[in-house]
Amino acid sequence: MEDKAFDIRPAERICTVNEYYFSRKLKEVARMNAEGMDIISLAIGSPDMPPSDSTIQTLCQEAAKPTAHGYQPTIGTPELRSAMAGFYRRWYGVELDAEKEILPLIGSKEGILHVTLAFVNPGDQVLVPNPGSIVPIRSCHYATFGEKQVGKHRLRTEYHPLRIPCSRHIR
């Protein structure tokens, strides 16, 4: 089978997206800290001093509750992103920059939607597997503003999910 190079470009709407304000500020604070400045950060309510003992005790009590565990609204810890990069290196032989190329998500649906919004323009055609989740189909409808550009194609059973399909895999 001949490998074909694809010309994949970001969607035009990406040009209108600016970096999140607090992301810029946190980078600025990190740079200033690296330069040895003593910065008191008031960003996003993040304290510079540890909480009191009673606060820590209350946090421990709350953390023991089964309902207290959920998704975190952050980019994840550096240790988590480094561990993810290590996983990809070990299992797939892929080198990733943990600071710039890894973003833990709330869930796979969020990732599918955001990747679709980032790379699909109105009028683009999108190939999604069938059977498969409804999420890619809905994401494509959002990205193309509801246009009927989503092609659902049945895939043969020998199709491997980590390979880009070519016409011989489509029935």
Image (cartoon, rainbow, N blue to C red):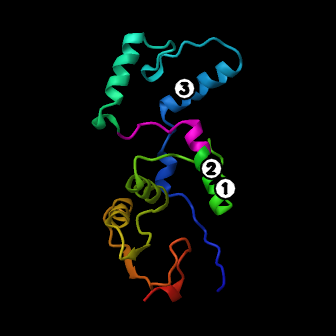
Q: Where, quadrant-wise, is the C terminus in this rendering?
A: bottom left
Label 3 close to label 2 by CB (< 8 Å): no
In the picture of the structure, the residue carrying the numbered disc 3 is 25
Classify 139 as above or below 3.
above
Q: What mark, if any, has residue 21 been given in the picture? A: none
Mark 3 or 1, closer to the camera: 1
Dot 1: element: helix
> Could you tell me how far apart the alpha carbons at marks 2 and 1 are, in whole angstroms?
6 Å
> Could you tell me how far apart the alpha carbons at marks 3 and 1 are, in whole angstroms?
31 Å
Residue shown at 54% from the left, 36% from the top? 77
Label 2 close to label 1 by CB (< 8 Å): yes
What percent of the width, then of the height, locates residue 137?
34, 67
Q: Which residues are magenta?
A: 70-82
What percent of the width, then of the height, locates residue 122?
41, 64
Report the predominant secondary structure element of the magenta stretch.
Answer: loop
Q: What mark, if any, has residue 85 been given in the picture? A: 2
